[in-house]
Amino acid sequence: MSGKAGRQARGREGEERAGRFLRDKGLRILAQNYRTRTGEIDIIALDGETLVFAEVKTWPALDFSDLEQGIDRKKQRRIIETAKYFLASHREYNGMEVRFDVLFLDILDIKHIESAFLE
């Protein structure tokens, strides 16, 4: 599969792998592919008393220097605005610590960057 359909399929598969990875680390997945008019968050999870908003990037090869390219400031703002919308509509999580993570996946590896960016 190539083109847009291939990228979408690879992205969905990557998000599923990332969800399993986070569950294996003890996080509780609350939502996947949470969408609002402000944007989308790939995974929302609880890590103890911390609410985690995670962006998943599935690329052919991992390179930490790609973080800035993959999650630019505009993308970060959309994720933050969508997280605010989630918190406004799910008041039971208000007052919790919040963290924005990024998970980079390639064919063999997952690199989990906790607190990859801040509001």
Image (tube, rainbow, N blue to C red):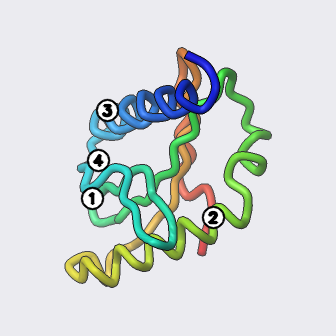
Q: Mark 1 or mark 4: which comes first in sequence?
A: 4
| Residue 13 placement, left or right of 89 | right
Task: Please state which of the two labelled residues, at mark 2 or mark 1, is closer to the viewer.
Answer: 2
Q: Mark 3 or mark 1: which comes first in sequence?
A: 3
Instruction: Name the element at disc 2.
Output: helix
Residue that sits furthest to the left in the current view:
92
> Residue 48: which numbered mark, if any?
1
Task: Please state which of the two labelled residues, at mark 3 or mark 1, is closer to the viewer.
Answer: 3
Residue 72 lies, in percent from the top left, at: 73, 58
Q: Mark 4 or mark 3: which comes first in sequence?
A: 3
Q: Amino acid at mark 2?
A: Gln
Label 4 neighbourhood size at 10 Å, few (<14), some (14-19), many (20+)?
A: some
Instruction: Name the element at disc 1.
Output: loop
The CA span between labels 2 and 3 is 23 Å
Q: Mark 2 or mark 1: which comes first in sequence?
A: 1
The CA span between labels 1 and 4 is 7 Å
Residue displayed at 76% across by 40% down: 66
Q: Which residue is mark 3?
A: 20
Q: Amino acid at mark 4?
A: Leu
Mark 2 vs 3: CB contact within 8 A: no
> Residue 76: which numbered mark, if any?
2
The CA span between labels 3 and 1 is 17 Å
Task: Please state which of the two labelled residues, at mark 4 or mark 3, is closer to the viewer.
Answer: 3
